[in-house]
């Protein structure tokens, strides 16, 4: 009996000794009061936004040489992406005139269409047909248009849909959306798109004129396998969105609107600091100013800079170009992921970061204009400079976009919808403007690794 009593007291002492640790664990859980499964579902949901379009773009080096449009194929694709902005317009009209609005079912249809189109690309991308007497890559362009329609519409329907969940999951969605650009690029590099091209002498035997052409290396796997892989990821995105709507753990992370407080369904005893007051206000001039800032960021990040990336990077070599593509694509999602750990930046901080973005973007445009002979060419300093500038620019653009979107998250009105509209307007203006400058002016000049051989 004495032994039992001593054991009981010892156990009680141990329990009392461990209780502070247990309290710390409970506090940690409360501070990070979130479901990692819902984070993963939101991330995979965001991944499906632009992965179809980005997948087609990174396959251009393998497709363009056999396409009947030749090097004009990217121009056709850019115009199709802009036409796909009809999606947000039609959705806006639908909201205005329809008495039955259910975004969930629309998103189901969009993700299903993108999944089927991307799978079909794997088997039909090389199919051509004659349109108005000219041969065109009708299958490739038509199926890409479907994926572009999904991407453009996602800005005005998918981001606002995440308002149904706690604010922390919006960051997960934005990280996934950023990864929709990185994942295809990473897979393409593994595929072998980024290998150094070779210069081959094609001079005819009876000619004294020396000619060289650039011959890319063979990929490790075909475009068919690549598109099937992208389609599989889109299928997972569809299933993730389904999980957000049917899984009890995801339903438990929804917020109840309208109400005075955004409660945490998974923890009814959560501290007040983890509840958002929906009596949200923002000065009117700041409200519109941030939307304009977001439009400018998307003009640069989605329209101008991607269009001139090859002009600003390729003169420094293939290695610098592909380091820029991959590392800059990583920088955006990583910058957005900071939203997991820090509070939303203030407008003053956003102004400072925006000024830095404009300076870096201006420098990138300067390098593109100086192509094919930019400063510090054929030097490691030049290669390092262009890679670092691109990483910094893309990272800051991603971070500022995340900061602006987060500021609009508590808006009980249509704040997130307007951020989507600003995103599409900025992207449209940037893409069209740069398309005209690249294709109809002589401001930007292409670079070929065989130019020095021709000169010799």
Image (tube, helix red, strand yellow):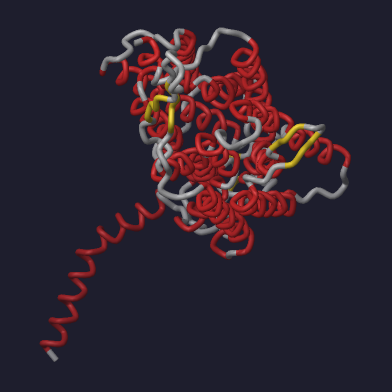
Residue at 43% across / 44% down in the picture? 219
Residue 246, given in percent of the width and then of the height, sits at: 63, 63
Residue at point 48%, 25% (across, down): 397
Residue closer to the observer: 159 or 49: 49
Closer to us: 215 or 191: 215
Considering depth in this image, is 152 or 168 the residue closer to the camera?
Answer: 152
Q: Position of residue 88 (x, y in %)?
A: 74, 35
Which residue is at 33% across, 12% downward? Answer: 377
210 lies left or right of 21 = right
Q: In what quadrant of the picture does the N terminus appear?
A: bottom left
Q: Is residue 348 left or right of residue 417?
A: left
Q: Quadrant of residue 13?
A: bottom left
Q: Position of residue 236 (x, y in %)?
A: 55, 57
Image position of 150 with respect to 229: above or below: above
Viewer-side residue, 329 vs 285:
329
Above or below for 365 versus 431: above
Percent position (x, y) of residue 241?
A: 61, 55
Relative to residue 128, is residue 339 drawn left or right? left
Q: Is residue 256 visible?
A: no
Above or below, 309 relative to 234: above
Residue 121 visible in this rendered orientation of the protein: yes
Quarter of the rendering occupied by the C terminus:
top left
Up-down relation of residue 187 to residue 369 (above or below): below
Asked if residue 308 lies left or right of residue 126, the reply is left
The residue located at (11%, 88%) in the rendering is: 2
């Amino acid at each position: 009996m004495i032994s039992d009593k001593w054991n009981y007291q010892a156990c009680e002492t141990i329990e009392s000794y461990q209780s502070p640790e247990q309290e710390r664990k409970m506090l940690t859980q409360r501070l990070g009061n979130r479901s990692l499964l819902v984070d993963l579902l939101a991330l995979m949901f965001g991944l499906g936004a632009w992965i179809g379009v980005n997948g087609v773009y990174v396959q251009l080096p393998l497709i363009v040489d056999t396409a009947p449009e030749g090097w004009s194929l990217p121009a056709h694709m850019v115009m199709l992406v802009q036409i796909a902005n009809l999606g947000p317009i039609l959705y806006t009209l639908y909201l205005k005139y329809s008495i039955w609005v259910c975004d969930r079912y629309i998103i189901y249809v969009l993700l299903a269409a993108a999944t089927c189109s991307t799978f079909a690309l794997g088997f039909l991308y090389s199919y051509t047909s004659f349109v108005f007497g000219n041969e065109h890559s009708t299958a490739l362009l038509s199926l890409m248009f479907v994926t572009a329609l999904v991407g453009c519409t996602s800005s005005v329907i998918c981001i606002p849909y995440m308002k149904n969940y706690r604010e922390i999951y919006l960051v997960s969605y934005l990280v996934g959306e950023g990864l929709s650009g990185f994942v295809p690029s990473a897979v393409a590099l593994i595929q072998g798109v980024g290998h150094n091209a070779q210069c081959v002498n094609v001079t005819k035997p009876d000619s004294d004129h020396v000619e060289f052409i650039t011959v890319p290396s063979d990929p490790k796997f075909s475009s068919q396998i690549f598109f099937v892989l992208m389609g599989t990821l889109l299928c997972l995105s569809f299933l993730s969105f389904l999980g957000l709507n049917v899984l009890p753990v995801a339903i438990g992370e929804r917020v109840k609107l309208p109400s005075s407080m955004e409660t945490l369904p998974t923890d009814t005893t959560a501290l007040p600091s983890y509840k958002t007051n929906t009596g949200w206000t923002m000065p009117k001039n700041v409200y519109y100013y941030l939307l304009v800032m977001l439009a400018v960021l998307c003009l640069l990040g989605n329209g101008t800079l991607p269009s001139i990336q090859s002009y600003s990077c390729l003169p420094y070599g293939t290695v610098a170009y592909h380091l820029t593509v991959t590392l800059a694509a990583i920088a955006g999602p990583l910058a957005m992921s900071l939203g997991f750990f820090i509070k939303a930046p203030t407008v003053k901080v956003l102004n400072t970061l925006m000024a830095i973005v404009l300076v870096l973007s201006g420098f990138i445009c300067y390098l593109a204009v100086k192509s094919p002979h930019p400063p510090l060419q054929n030097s490691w300093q030049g290669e390092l400079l262009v890679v670092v500038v691109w990483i910094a620019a893309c990272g800051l653009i991603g971070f500022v976009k995340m900061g602006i979107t987060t500021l609009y998250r508590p808006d009980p009105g249509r704040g997130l919808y307007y951020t989507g509209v600003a995103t599409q307007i900025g992207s449209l203006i940037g893409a069209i403007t740069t398309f005209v400058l690249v294709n109809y002016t002589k401001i930007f000049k292409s670079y070929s690794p065989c130019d020095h051989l021709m000169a010799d």
